Image (cartoon, rainbow, N blue to C red):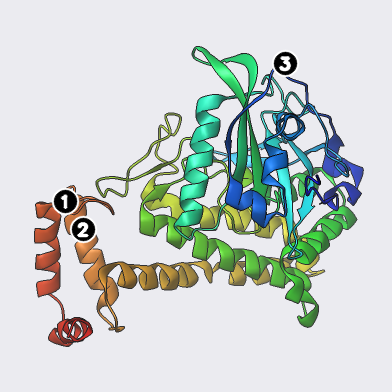
Amino acid sequence: MESGWKLDNSYARLPKSFFTRQSPTAVPSPKLIILNDPLAVSLGLNVQELQSKDGVAIFAGNQIPEGALPLAQAYAGHQFGNFTMLGDGRALLIGEQVTPHGARLDIQLKGAGRTPYSRRGDGRAALGPMLREYIISEAMHALGIATTRSLAVVTTGESVIRETDQPGAILTRVAASHLRVGTFQYISAWGTTEELRELADYTLQRHFPGAEDTDNHYLFLLQEVIKRQAALIAKWQLVGFIHGVMNTDNMTLSGETIDYGPCAFMDAYDPVTVFSSIDLKGRYAYGNQPMIAVWNLARFAETLLPLLHDNEEQAVKIAQDAISNFTAMYRCNWLAGMRAKLGIVTEEAQDESLIEDLLSMMQKYHADMSSNISVQTLKLLLVFFCHFNIIWLVNIMSIYK
């Protein structure tokens, strides 16, 4: 019976400086913990075969599917504002699955062993965090938020040492790609302009095929990434999602959420909420996420300057003009989402200020962000609605005639 793997390796055809070929490190006794059947089917994979001994061996990195060319991607990034060389320290891209509908999706094994970019890490992952990423990424997908997906989690039969000994595990991640702002930062810092152009062209071909109809392909790339990130961050804010580590290496160019480390969904509404134990200064607090997105996008724009215009001063102006559009795009997405959450069916000039008033009251009284509506939250909503134009109330009532 065919497994359904149809792997290509377009990333492996880029310059060798972009990655290092690396095979997974074998594990002693892999066991399938969870398999995402619907996702597997959408990828064109045979669920029964994936559950077999050979299928589990692929998820564990003990067996390489036909057509795979495992590699660790090189990238850099600003981590809490500090620039550093990074790369896949415990993850391997085994290839790109071409689905029955023609989509091309990265298949990555997270926790597959050491790579040249591991530094002091052991290249492994613990079961708890891998299950957590599986659950949260699939929850984000169900909420309609762009995200990497989780295909499977297997245990390895080994222990990993973290705070305590924990069961080792490997997550199979599915993504539109693993191209990051940090990928461009790496090539910008240590590559050539031609390599940068090749990376940009690859990104356009992979994610933004409309560039051929534009006068400036690389401005189009910047604009499209800004547009996708504005939509993504707005959706994060609407559900109270706090990423926790919005480093530039964790901002994808596809517009998908990636890296579910110290993330969480906010309970009581408070913009200064932080869940990461290492974010001592609150850089990546809930309320800062739109601003950090702009900062990250500015770092991306900096890498594109040699491609935007031959004149550096003109290139900077082009980039600044593009970045300046983020806030309006974000607010438009966020405001539309807030109207939907509150049942506002018409657009009024005062909507934004009224919504901001509601959020201020929610913060003052520690009202719940999105789940169970307490009596206190209902009281706040009542006060909020009393401020509204009577026309809005009539519109709402007309829905339930």
Q: Which residue is mark 2?
A: 360
* Side of 281 where 158 appears, left or right: right
Please determine whether, in this image, residue 192 is positioned above or below residue 127: below
Which amino acid, by three-letter code, is at mark 2?
Answer: Ser
Secondary structure under badge 3? loop
Q: Is residue 343 visible?
A: yes
Q: Nearer the viewer, mark 1 or mark 3?
A: 3
Between marks 2 and 3, how big is the CA–CA gap?
54 Å
Q: 10 Å neighbourhood of mark 1: few (<14), some, or many (≥20)? A: few
Q: Which residue is mark 1?
A: 364
Which amino acid, by three-letter code, is at mark 1?
Answer: Lys
Q: Cβ–Cβ below 8 Å for labels 1 and 2? A: yes
Please determine whether, in this image, residue 16 is positioned above or below residue 325: above
Relative image position of residue 130 (x, y in whole percent): 55, 32
What mark, if any, has residue 28 been given in the picture?
Answer: 3
Does label 2 or label 3 sit earlier along the sequence? 3
Q: 10 Å neighbourhood of mark 3: few (<14), some, or many (≥20)? A: few
Determine the residue positioned at 66% across, 38% down: 172
Q: Cβ–Cβ below 8 Å for labels 2 and 3? A: no
Determine the residue positioned at 66% across, 47% down: 174
